[in-house]
Amino acid sequence: MDWLQALVLGIVQGLSEFLPISSTAHLRIVPHLL
């Protein structure tokens, strides 16, 4: 994992913490989209 991918995953998790859905699920889905 490079720094750009880590940055994107951090942003996704930070934004999804406010939503009533699992941020862990986002962290599993986003790498497949990158």
Image (cartoon, helix red, strand yellow):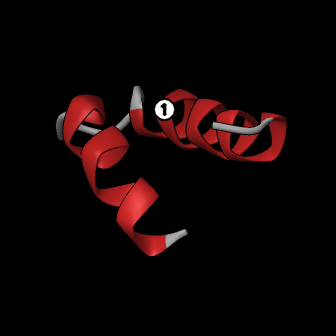
* Residue at 20%, 42% in the rendered image: 25
Image quadrant occupied by the C terminus: bottom right
Residue 11, percent across and down? 65, 38
Please say if 33 is above or below 31: below
Q: Secondary structure at mark 1?
A: helix
* Residue at 29%, 57% in the rendered image: 29
Q: How many marks?
A: 1
Pick the front one: 23 or 31:
31
Please, what is the three-letter code of the amino acid marked with disc 1? Gln
Q: Quadrant of residue 4?
A: top right
Q: Kindly identify which residue carries mark 1.
A: 13
Decide if residue 34 is on the left or right side of residue 22.
right
Please say if 22 is above or below 26: above
Q: Quadrant of residue 22?
A: top left
Q: Quadrant of residue 23?
A: top left
Decide if residue 2 is on the left or right side of residue 32.
right
Pick the front one: 28 or 22:
28
User: Which residue in the rendered view is the most extreme toward the bottom?
Assistant: 33
Pick the front one: 28 or 14:
28
User: Which residue in the rendered view is the most extreme toward the front?
Assistant: 1
* Residue at 48%, 32% in the rendered image: 13
**Mark 1 surroundings: few (<14), some (14-19) or many (≥20) residues within 10 A:** some
Residue 6, percent across and down? 67, 33
* Residue at 27%, 45% in the rendered image: 28
Residue 5, percent across and down? 68, 46
Decide if residue 22 is on the left or right side of residue 19.
left
